[in-house]
Image (tube, grey):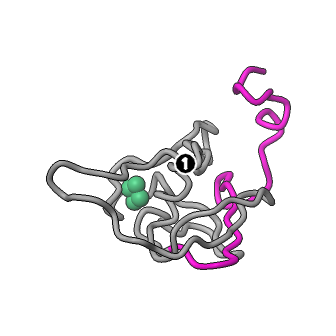
Amino acid sequence: MLRIQEHPILGSTEERRLVTFTLDGRELTGYEGEPIAAALKAAGVMVHRYTAKQHKPRGIFCAIGRCTDCVMIVDGTPNVRTCITPLREGMRVQTQYGVSAQPYQEIRRCNKNGEI
Ligand code: FES
């Protein structure tokens, strides 16, 4: 996991409960109560959604619940701001394509590096 364990001003992080959740069917872990986006970032996930018109990737931008770049489908509900939504055990998180969990045709043809 990519996390800051010790900070010169904030000190060390306190012990938290590790929980399991899924991203597009892939099992990941994060700390209970932390923002979903923080758990995804720690797992190396940068893309949360693709825009509806131009199908451009988006991820964390403001990180304070103002911009909607981090929205994803969480437990079947689209447009959930993952930067301000606490992680819970068993959450089912999906990448959002427009307002759907169904990938766009041209994105399906991309390899894992985003090349068509
Ligand atoms: S990153 Fe802006 S609302 Fe979440």
Q: Is residue 17 above or below residue 105?
A: below
Residue 106 percent location from the top left of the image: 79, 33
Q: Considering the numbered disc 1 on the image, is that residue within a helix, a strand or a loop?
A: loop
Q: Residue at x 64, y 39 (%)?
A: 55
* Residue 95 within the magenta-colored segment of the rendering: yes
Where residue 40 appears, as percent x and y from the top left, is: 56, 54
What type is the residue that disc 1 sits on? Answer: Met
User: Mainly helix, strand or loop, the magenta region?
Assistant: loop
Please tell me which residue lies in front, 29 or 64: 29
Above or below 110: residue 68: below
Read off the magenta span. Answer: 87-116
Write the residue at 52% across / 76% down.
17
Residue 43 or residue 7, whichever sits in front = 7
Q: Which residue is mark 1?
A: 1
Looking at the image, residue 35 lies above or below residue 51: below
Image point 58% across, 36% down: which residue? 56
